[in-house]
């Protein structure tokens, strides 16, 4: 039998691996979907723009899912344990988790021509500070790769409009 055709107890898997965990752990990525569990705390300031829909299922704790509406205005979706949320493709979003937050995420595998985008926005005036694209092959390190340039060059975190510096 193929491994993905067998039942899988997600909560048991988390409990068995709870002490040996980084920020994110991939469950599968060898199909049309990538599924992973991610936990808090995190300090994300970027907005991820995924070319496909994403499904968030909040397992434990709370997820503050910041996103930018069509008008560019910052919005917040608060997900509590048991909440399920479908984020449409191309919506800039920033999942921020406190300690004790565990989220199951399902995304579509990227097509060969697709790139994910990461954008940093001034928290004072909403001006775009920096944007980068990345080939999203591995959710374990995509955010770290995207953030590396911002951390390497403080000028990228300084707003050209109002002078505010984004605390990374």
Image (spheres, grey):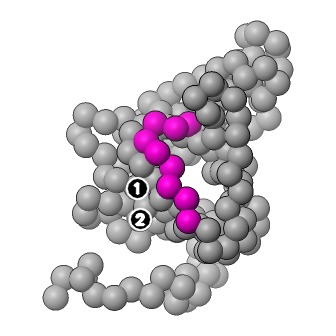
* Apparent side of residue 29 relative to residue 117 in the rendered image (left or right): left
Label 1: which residue?
A: 107
Location of the N terminus by quadrant is: bottom left
Q: Position of residue 148 (x, y in %)?
A: 58, 36
Is 57 on the left or on the right of 123, as rendered?
A: left
Residue 27 seen in the current view: yes
**Which numbered disc covers residue 35?**
2
What segment carries the magenta color?
A: 84-92
Q: Quadrant of residue 26?
A: bottom left
SS at mark 2?
strand
Q: Position of residue 116 (x, y in %)?
A: 42, 37
Residue sitting farthest toward the left: 1
Q: Please give left or right for residue 116 compared with residue 112 in the image.
A: right
Q: Residues within 10 Å of mark 1 (few under 14, many from 20)?
A: many
Q: Residues within 10 Å of mark 2 (few under 14, many from 20)?
A: many
Name the residue: 58% across, 29% down. Answer: 70
Q: What's the residue at 67%, 33% (across, down)?
A: 151
Query: Residue placed at 63% from the left, 25% from the top?
Result: 71
Height in image: 16 above or below 119?
A: below
Residue plotted at (51% across, 49% down): 87
Q: Does 35 sit above or below residue 69?
A: below
Q: Is residue 141 visible?
A: no
Quarter assignment of residue 133: top left
Viewer-proximal residue, 121 or 89?
89
Q: Nearer the viewer, residue 147 or 67?
A: 67
User: Which disc number belongs to residue 53?
Assistant: none
Q: Earlier in the sequence, mark 2 or mark 1?
A: 2
């Amino acid at each position: 039998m193929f491994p993905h055709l067998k039942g899988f107890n997600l909560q048991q898997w988390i409990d068995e691996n709870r002490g040996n965990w980084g920020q994110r752990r991939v469950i599968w990525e060898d199909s049309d979907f990538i599924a992973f569990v991610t936990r808090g705390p995190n300090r994300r300031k970027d907005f991820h723009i995924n070319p496909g829909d994403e499904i968030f299922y909040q397992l434990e704790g709370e997820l503050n899912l910041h996103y930018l509406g069509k008008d560019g205005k910052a919005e917040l979706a608060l997900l509590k344990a048991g909440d399920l949320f479908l984020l449409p493709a191309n919506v800039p979003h920033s999942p921020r988790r406190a300690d004790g937050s565990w989220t199951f995420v399902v995304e579509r595998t990227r097509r060969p021509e697709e790139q994910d985008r990461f954008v940093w926005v001034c928290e004072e005036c909403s001006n775009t500070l920096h944007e980068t694209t990345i080939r999203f092959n591995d959710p374990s390190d995509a955010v770290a790769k995207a953030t590396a340039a911002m951390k390497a060059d403080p000028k990228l975190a300084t707003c050209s409009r109002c002078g505010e510096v984004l605390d990374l």
